[in-house]
Amino acid sequence: MEEVVTEEELREVLKKKHPTAYIGYAPTGTLHIGH
């Protein structure tokens, strides 16, 4: 697993045969619908 920050990093990950993705949440304040 690796972190992707830039568009170029995303392109490299998408070249893999089976790319995977995740999204993480951290309770760092009042929860709200912001995504």
Image (cartoon, rainbow, N blue to C red):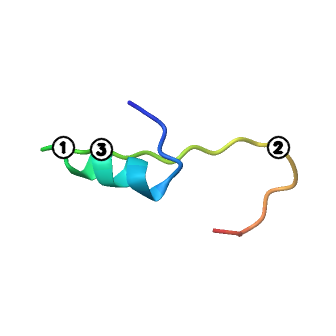
Q: Nearer the viewer, mark 3 or mark 2?
A: 3
Secondary structure at numbered mark 2: loop
Say which residue appears at 79% left-offset and 57% top-offset.
31
Q: Position of residue 24 (x, y in %)?
A: 57, 43
Residue on which the image places disc 2: 28
Whether tag 2 and tag 1 are in contact, CB under 8 A, the answer is: no
Q: Mark 1 is on which residue type?
A: Lys
Question: Looking at the image, is mark 2 or mark 1 earlier in the sequence?
Answer: 1
Q: Position of residue 23 (x, y in %)?
A: 51, 48
Q: Nearer the viewer, mark 1 or mark 3?
A: 1
Picture layout, residue 16 above or below residue 1: below
Q: Mark 2 is on which residue type?
A: Thr
Residue on which the image places disc 1: 16
Question: Looking at the image, is mark 3 or mark 2 earlier in the sequence?
Answer: 3
Secondary structure at numbered mark 3: loop
Horizontally, is 20 left or right of 7 in the view? left
Say which residue appears at 30% left-offset and 47% top-offset.
12
Picture layout, residue 14 above or below residue 35: above
Secondary structure at numbered mark 1: loop
Q: CA distance from mark 3 to mark 2?
A: 26 Å
